[in-house]
Image (tube, coloured by chain):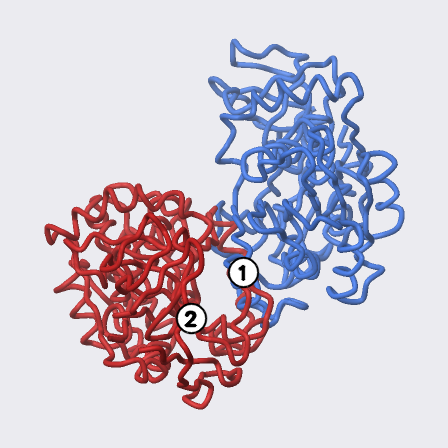
Chain colours: A blue, B red
Amino acid sequence: MTQMTRIVLASRPTGSPEPANFRLEDAPIPEPGEGQIAVRITAMSLDPYMRGRMDDAKSYAAPVPVGGTMEGGAVGQVTASNSKHFAPGDWVFGMFGWATHAVADAKLCRKLDPALPVTTALGVLGMPGFTGWFGLMEYGRPKAGETVVVAAATGPVGSMVGQIAKSLGCRVIGIAGGADKCAMAVDTFGFDACLDHRAHDDAKSLRAALQAECPKGVDIYFENVAGKVLEAVLPCMNVGGRIPVCGMISWYNEGGLGMNAGGAKDQLPKLWRTILVNRLHVHGFIISDHWARFPEFMAQVAPMVADGRLAYVEDVAEGLAAAPDAFIGMLQGRNRGKQIVRVG
Amino acid sequence: MTQMTRIVLASRPTGSPEPANFRLEDAPIPEPGEGQIAVRITAMSLDPYMRGRMDDAKSYAAPVPVGGTMEGGAVGQVTASNSKHFAPGDWVFGMFGWATHAVADAKLCRKLDPALPVTTALGVLGMPGFTGWFGLMEYGRPKAGETVVVAAATGPVGSMVGQIAKSLGCRVIGIAGGADKCAMAVDTFGFDACLDHRAHDDAKSLRAALQAECPKGVDIYFENVAGKVLEAVLPCMNVGGRIPVCGMISWYNEGGLGMNAGGAKDQLPKLWRTILVNRLHVHGFIISDHWARFPEFMAQVAPMVADGRLAYVEDVAEGLAAAPDAFIGMLQGRNRGKQIVRVG
């Protein structure tokens, strides 16, 4: 077999991506060079950050070129190796892209422990789980008895934040879109409560529900959605509160900078005043700056996954060709838990 | 003499304060009780935070009641003491209010070293200077070679920030309103450059001028004005930049929360995205939380004031009756340096 299948960026989206922005195509499988490995991909990750890579805007990472393979983390098995660190049959994680096969520099890949399901390297024990753990511990600085609010509570970032905060003795309130997600947050991930933002027409209504669940106010808001949820939570923040910011999915399809995002109009003075008056600490972070802390994360969290103390949920789309629809759906919140694609 | 003069809040302002919001009146001088001192006030401070006290809105401090004496720090001489810590003739700082005389709990007052002009306790060696020093050191964390942008550069906060940052080897760019203030920032306070925001019609124009002065981007933006200046600086922030936020004077007269402040419309998504993408650290703070650090500030900065390494400028209004107009003018930027009122 010398041919692989991949998905390339056919055109840049305006607003929400559509299937026509993607194209499935065949390509020859490259030969691994010196220090490289060849990998047969079994599963790939879909993550909100990929929406940013589809735009040609200045950001913290270069955009995917039109015609280029969509970027992304994936797991698979080594089929050929020109590196002493890998042997055929090894399970491996790397930034292999949306494809059935890949060739990559061995030093950029991570060998996986097959004692755990290898797909955990895409979610709970991968970039999203690490993002939640790092942002909470480094910038949230949770203390027992504090109240933590987590947006996108059932996603792989939010469910990590919530479970770690619970393990540290915090009261944890989730926010998610849909009654079934809210039930999952409480029943599967152990949140104290979870609010359905879709059941509230506006930020004010959501805020009232949140205040009822947070009688002592909010000490940490883990931000990855922005929009209406941010507007609802902000006035509930306690003095000295912390806001780790790792994403803003509700604005990703709004055209980026400075657009009239829903509900956000005229909110800047309000935000800025709350930061001042409530002495908030707002920390933007990009997890790729912090890989040095990954071993610490794995040492702490992998045992919790192995023995079941820390739950995770995967939403599996079948086959590479299903990736665009699953990605579009994830941006709309259709996924339940970590969205992955089973490739082979 | 048994009568004092004071200025009370006659009515709450809508937008910018007007003279009719204040009333000069006579009142009996109270007798000091146990543990109290009586003070003849010689000079009082005017500060932007007082605008917030005139509103009946929830904030970090209670509003001045209508009919109550306007709040504020002042210096004066003890005329009678029921405290073993003070004797008549001592110079003292306290929150004496807009008045010619006051009685106050001795334990809330601070004895002044008459070797330095006592009015320094209102500005460079008082709350404003401490605000600048603390915010820069604690949240700005300046390193030699970094670029620091300081709004309201010639005010008592900004001029402290700029001079301390310069002493630590930073490049320091000020922003001020008017060519004479910009000259003062450079000539008196030693800023590397200072931009006149009134010479720029919009944030974009101001930003272009700023970029020309900050070829290596901005590492620290010391925020105390918000509005157009914030909008101009934000896109210039380097990755890992820090924004201490201690005020937002340009919005103080805008009616507070959520109003359509000039230039701020639709800016929230842009701000939030910049915080994320550039991994900014935004810290709101209220200096009254941090008085425990005041001795450290005095130990470091008072010698610099005493020997002239650190400059300060005072803008003196003559007589208590001049306070309302001086205050209104300060909110419009009419003052040159720290605004004080000579009372007696």
Q: Residue at x 66, y 61 (%)?
A: A231
Q: Is residue B26 left or right of residue B334?
A: right
Q: Mark 2: which amino acid?
A: Pro
Q: Which residue is mark 1?
A: B60
Contact between marks 1 and 2 (CB within 8 A): the answer is no
Q: Secondary structure at mark 1?
A: loop
Q: Nearer the viewer, residue A220 or B131?
A: B131
Residue B174: x %, y % from top left: 26, 63
Q: Is residue B9 left or right of residue B100?
A: right
Q: Mark 1: which amino acid?
A: Tyr
Q: How many marks?
A: 2
Q: Nearer the viewer, residue A40 or B72?
A: B72
Residue B19: x %, y % from top left: 41, 89
Q: Would you place residue B19 above or below residue B74 in this image?
A: below
Q: Is residue B92 left or right of residue A283?
A: left
Residue A103: x %, y % from top left: 57, 26
Q: Which residue is mark 2?
A: B30
- Disc with the residue nearer the chain's start (1 vs 2): 2
Calculate the distance from the C-alpha at mark 1 to the C-alpha at mark 2.
29 Å
